[in-house]
Amino acid sequence: MTIEFVGVEKVYPGGARSVRGVSFQVREGEMVGLLGPSGSGKTTILRLIAGLERPTKGEIWIGGKRVTDLPPQKRNVGLVFQNYALFQHMTVYDNVAFGLKEKRVPRDEIDRRVRELLGYMRLTEYANRFPRELSGGQQQRVALARALAPRPQVLLFDEPFAAIDTQIRRELRKFVREVHDELGVTSLFVTHDQEEALEIADRVLVLHEGRVEQLGTPEEVYEQPETLFVASFIGESNVWRRPVQGGAVEVAGLRLPVDPAIPNGTPVAVVVRPKDVQLHPADREEGQGQILRSAFKGAYSACFVRTRDHEVWEVHVPSADRHLLSPGAWVRMDVHKFFVFPA
Amino acid sequence: MRFERIALHSLLAGAMLLIFVLPLGAVFEQAFAGGWPGFVRAVTSPIAVRAFELTVVLAVVVAILNTAMGLLIAVSLERWRAPLSMALDAVIDLPLAIPTAVSGLMLVLLYGPASPVGRWLAGHGVSIVYTRLGILFALVFVTVPYAVRALQPALQQLDRREEEAAWTLGAHAHRVWLRVILPALRHALGSAFVLTLTRAMIEFGSVVMVSGNKPMQTEVAAVYIYGLLENYDQQGASAAAVVLMLLCAIAFALEGSLLTSLARRRRHADPLKEREEAHV
Ligand SMILES: Nc1ncnc2c1ncn2[C@@H]1O[C@H](COP(=O)(O)OP(=O)(O)OP(=O)(O)O)[C@@H](O)[C@H]1O
Ligand SMILES: [Mg+2]
């Protein structure tokens, strides 16, 4: 199922404009991650797709059908809530069977489908437990099984792994991706965890203050950010604001060339990723900065360099070169790649 | 420190003795002053039996009506936010705030033969004051706040997302009520029912005003007990009081066991096993 937003606005009764003129298209069978700071409208967008909110303006299409005024019961959209929202008074079995009973599926078939899903989710032995008797990860799988049971064409996840610890979280997200691929559904998931979004999403929708900043593959939003917000929000970055001087911007004693059409004095923001800087040992005279400290991160070390104008840069250095990084040492910096945005 | 604690405990024990144990003991002692046969004779007289019957039947009807009405009022206060809900919220405690005798008096004044409403109703063959219908009215009025206040917090605590999840799974509003909201409210509905039931069984002030207290017809247990006492039949009054207390105790015990058995039944209903057995 494709999903399309056309100029969708959502103003809550209280007056909060949480989604402002949002348009985007999700392709059939795609898994899209929604990324954005708190309050940027991620949950609202999922609720609009599920039909739990009506847009104030604009249209929503699912699978080529206009669903703007369709109630949630008729959308065939599965939603996994952040707190799972399991039916507390029902057993795991009854939770999963709920949607099938509502669709008046014959009893035997309900039983077959529920057992199949419980087996798939490794929940068979918990069929007769109540939600409060399960761990967070198990509840999460019940919520997923419940949403999958009526065979939805669209699956929505609102921070599905937020309350789960790292190890199980990694397993679960791989599992969710497998489920998605196997069923061939179209999925959207909200996450605060960029690594998670970049790892399992086909494309990432970056939101900021109710607007779409960029929709692109993980590589695109990381390597070719379209806005300053995307560049600074996705991944680590050093952001410097400077006026243009003679077709270049000066940072840390380096002249970084910009579009010559930009007139002198125009303020711009320069974004440099920590991995796009190379450090070379230097003596005090030619060094551009001094190592403050470094933090071991596994394959690389995050190194903080203070320049002569007292700006602090984050630079990622392969851990093999860590011996260069003793605090106080002078270094020279090479910038391989940078982005320039209007500031 | 230890002395203080002992002092506190003996003070509490003394108070309990004075307030609960001694008066209760006095009632039981009086009730069985004529031995078991005397007790049985007192509580099985036709007038007594009729009074207990009327009390229980009316209380059950009131409890059913008010659990339903309490739910409706609580929902309109918590969910619909109707324009008048603020006023309703303030008014709902009124029956608790005014003496129940005054509640009875209000009904008599409103529906009595002297009032236009009463005359109009009488013209259509309906009389409320000095009938069982009047008692029902009084009991409904006096006990409805208990039902509302038992249900309101439970409604507030419902997780709206459970209902939203049910919608996305295809359940329409009435199905969501049936399968998600009401089951989640079952404890609160149980307390609302038992609270109004017991409160209706022991109500005196309002009933004595509207019922006319005709033995065998409109005399409920509490009024019957009062009547015996007025006639210096302390033993009969005490015996009837013991039965009335017993009825209330049974109501509470029933609520408790009903709730635990409900919970246990869910626990043992084993859909996988049941069906496996069926396949064998
Ligand atoms: N029911 C509501 N009534 C009024 N305003 C709301 C409501 N729900 C959300 N908002 C507002 O809409 C904006 C977007 O909220 P939304 O929940 O979509 O953000 P989010 O991106 O999911 O944030 P988070 O990451 O914190 O979950 C916020 O400013 C929020 O205050
Ligand atoms: Mg949210």
Image (cartoon, coloured by chain):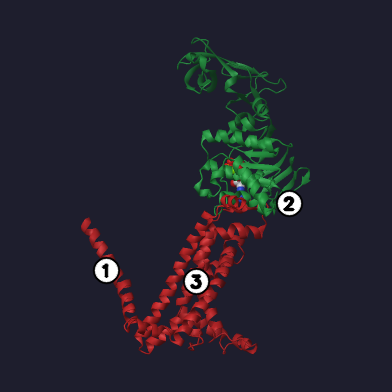
Query: Crowding at label 1, few (<14), some or many (≥20) Cα neighbours within 10 Å?
Result: few
Contact (CB < 8 A) between labels 3 and 2?
no
User: Mark 1, chain letter?
Assistant: B
Nearest the viewer among B274 and A164 is: B274
Mark-to-mark CA distance, 3 and 1: 32 Å
The amino acid on which the numbered mark 1 sits, given as a three-letter code, is Gly
The amino acid on which the numbered mark 3 sits, given as a three-letter code, is Thr
Q: Earlier in the sequence, mark 3 or mark 1?
A: 1
Give residue A72's position: percent from left, percent from top: 69, 51
- Ligand 1 closer than 8 Å to label 2 CB: no
- In the rendered view, tell whether residue A51 sits above or below residue B75: above
Identify the mark at residue B130; answer none if there is no mark.
none
Mark 1, secondary structure of its residue = helix
Mark 3, secondary structure of its residue = helix
- In the rendered view, tell whether residue A181 sits above or below residue B70: above
Query: Crowding at label 3, few (<14), some or many (≥20) Cα neighbours within 10 Å?
Result: many
Q: Which chain is green?
A: A
Give residue B183's position: percent from left, percent from top: 56, 59
Decide if residue A341 is on the left or right side of residue B234: right
Q: Which chain is red?
A: B
Q: Label 3 belongs to which residue?
A: B196
Q: Label 1 belongs to which residue?
A: B14
Q: Label 2 belongs to which residue?
A: A70
Decide if residue B34 is on the left or right side of residue A177: left
Decide if residue A28 is on the left or right side of residue A253: right
- Quadrant observed for ligand 2 in the rendered image: top right
Mark-to-mark CA distance, 2 and 1: 68 Å
- In the rendered view, tell whether residue A266 sits above or below residue A82: above
Q: Answer yes or no: are tags 3 and 1 on the same subunit.
A: yes
Q: Quadrant of residue B225?
A: bottom left
Give residue B42's position: percent from left, percent from top: 39, 85
Q: Quadrant of residue B73?
A: bottom right
